[in-house]
Image: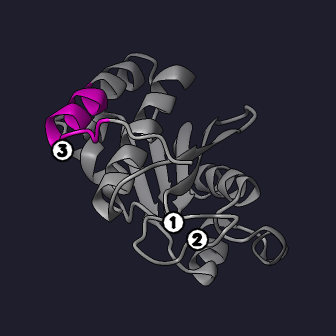
Amino acid sequence: MPVPVPVPTDDALREIAESIGTQLLGDRHMLVTAESCTGGWIAKTVTDVAGSSGWFDCGLAAYSYEAKQALLGVRPQTLEEHGAVSRETAIEMVSGALVHSGATVAVAVTGIAGPGGGTGDKPVGTVWIAWKRRGGYPQAEMFAFAGDRDAVRRQTVAEALRGLERLL
């Protein structure tokens, strides 16, 4: 059951992005994003920060199965067996983002923002987020966000950025 949480504002997202940028820059890391349900919103949020070119490499928005395979190296078997919204897909997305970029830190998101597309097993608001450092092991977590499409996407961006803070 989705837990109602405050939906982050643009200012709140910018604040988290600024903090991440300071950490990435200080540790000489470059970030790559691999986004499905957020459609590039994480990349937009971090590039709203002045000076982000010093720590942001690129963002990949991959909605379709074909794009996930071609741009991020997600295996067809993974998509067939587990679906796009799964731990396995999120992990392959985050790993593929590092392989296909010059970045050292990655975040990947895949989920069902709604209003349609949900199922009994994967209702609207189900989102998988994965994080990884180059040479490290991926971490992935499932979230059950509440609210409309905008609320689910905003919460996803915030949690993706908070996870990067923890990773760093």
- Amino acid type, label 3: Asp
Q: Quadrant of residue 150?
A: bottom left
Q: Residues within 10 Å of mark 2 (few under 14, many from 20)?
A: some
Frontmost of labels 1 and 2 is 1
Residue named by callout 1: 112
- Amino acid type, label 2: Leu
Percent x, y of residue 138: 71, 38
x 53%, y 44%: residue: 107
Q: Residues within 10 Å of mark 1 (few under 14, many from 20)?
A: many
Percent x, y of residue 139: 69, 36
x 65%, y 36%: residue: 134
- Residue 48 is tagged as 3
Q: Quadrant of residue 88?
A: bottom right
Q: Earlier in the sequence, mark 2 or mark 3?
A: 3
x 40%, y 73%: residue: 115
Q: Please tell me how many numbered marks the rendered image carries.
A: 3
Please state the extent of the stretch shown in magenta in the rendering. Answer: 6-18
What SS does tag 2 mark? helix
Q: Residues within 10 Å of mark 3 (few under 14, many from 20)?
A: few
Percent x, y of residue 86: 70, 59
- Residue 71 is tagged as 2
Q: Is residue 12 magenta?
A: yes
Vertical comparison of 89 with 4: above or below? below
Q: Is residue 14 magenta?
A: yes
